[in-house]
Amino acid sequence: MDSRSYVARSARHGHETTFAIERQTDGNGTTRLILYGELDAATRGDLRTALRAEQRAGAAVVVVLDQLSYLDSAGIAELIDASTHARRTGRRFAVTPGTGNARHVLWITGVLGQLCEP
């Protein structure tokens, strides 16, 4: 299994946000992007960059949210955009929400079923 990590730190309104993406590829060509930290307006561009790279490679993508401590509407919008693009282009895309804060936020906003359907 191939594994690489990308880390981004950004300061916004006097608050430093830590966000990391660990990329793992299995033998079937499916890429798992495991997200850590805070996915918000300050870090969504990092996720967008990683997702676009996987789209260009034609990989099936699973985004794992188990390790996120914070998820806001900007992060949700990025996940929805990626899901929509994958469906349009016939690529597999899934989100694994875990059981924590990210799952709760997706449920409250009404997109849990849309992003996490089988």
Image (tube, grey):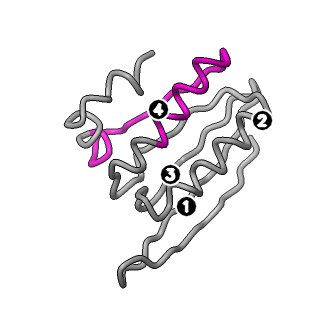
Q: What mark, if any, has residue 20 been given in the picture?
A: 1
Q: Residue at x 32, y 29 (%)?
A: 111
Measured in 3D between alpha carbons, the distance from the residue under mark 1 to the one under mark 3, in whole angstroms, is 6 Å
Side of 51 where 29 appears, left or right = right
Q: Is residue 11 left or right of residue 100?
A: right
Instruction: Give the x, y percent position of residue 30.
Output: 68, 29
Q: Amino acid at mark 4?
A: Val
At label 4, counting other C-alpha atoms closer than 10 Å, the crowd grade (few under 14, some 14-19, many 20 or more) is: many
Residue at x 57% of width, y 56% of height: 45
Residue at label 3? Answer: 35
Given the image, on which type of amino acid does mark 2 rest? Answer: Arg
CA neighbours of label 3 inside 10 A, class few (<14), some (14 to 19), many (20+): many
For the residues marked 2 and 4, what is the alpha-carbon distance in whole angstroms? 19 Å
Viewer-nearest of discs 2 and 4:
2
Q: What segment is highlighted magenta in the picture?
A: 78-103
Residue drawn where x is 76% and y is 28% of the image = 58
Q: Which residue is mark 2?
A: 56
Q: Residue 117: say if magenta.
A: no
